[in-house]
Image: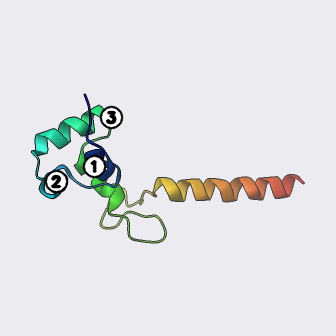
């Protein structure tokens, strides 16, 4: 399947299928097929990731049943790097 570059760009930026279809005047099913071809999850699954607005990396408006808040992949990576730096410093 040949994917239009403008659709692929907007998908990677995190826009929903409906938003992309409105902007580019195409059918939402066209955008959905492009999203599947690019192997991106449906837009609603990405919505939680793009809703992050809190600098701690926690997801805004999300309250799990156990009370523990998940952190974003970027925050997880930053935490991992700080831990490795501390371990290297202690080992030296």
Q: Earlier in the sequence, mark 2 or mark 3?
A: 2
* Nearer the observer, 25 or 72: 25
Q: Are marks 2 and 3 in contact (CB under 8 Å)?
A: no
Q: Position of residue 7 (x, y in %)?
A: 25, 47
How far, Cα to Cα, is label 2 from label 3? Answer: 21 Å
Kindly identify which residue carries mark 1: 6
Q: Are marks 2 and 1 in contact (CB under 8 Å)?
A: yes
Helix, strand, or loop for circle 1?
helix
Q: In which quarter of the view is residue 72 placed?
A: bottom left
Helix, strand, or loop for circle 2?
helix
State the residue at coordinates (16%, 58%). 23
Helix, strand, or loop for circle 3?
loop
Kindly identify which residue carries mark 2: 24
- Few, some or many residues within 10 Å of mark 1 (<14, 14–19, 20+): few
Kindly identify which residue carries mark 3: 39
Q: Position of residue 65 (x, y in %)?
A: 31, 56
How far, Cα to Cα, is label 2 from label 1? Answer: 8 Å
Q: Residue lying at the far top in this picture: please name it.
A: 1
Q: Can residue 65 be spotted in the picture?
A: no
State the residue at coordinates (26%, 34%). 36
Q: In the image, is 29 to the left or to the right of 34? A: left
């Amino acid at each position: 399947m040949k994917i239009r570059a403008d659709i692929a760009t907007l998908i990677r930026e995190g826009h929903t299928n409906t938003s992309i279809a409105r902007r580019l005047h195409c059918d939402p099913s066209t955008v959905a097929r492009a999203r599947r071809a690019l192997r991106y999850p449906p837009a609603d699954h990405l919505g939680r990731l793009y809703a992050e607005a809190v600098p701690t990396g926690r997801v805004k408006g999300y309250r799990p049943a156990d009370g523990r808040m998940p952190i974003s992949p970027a925050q997880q990576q930053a935490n991992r790097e700080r831990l490795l730096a501390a371990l290297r410093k202690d080992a030296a």
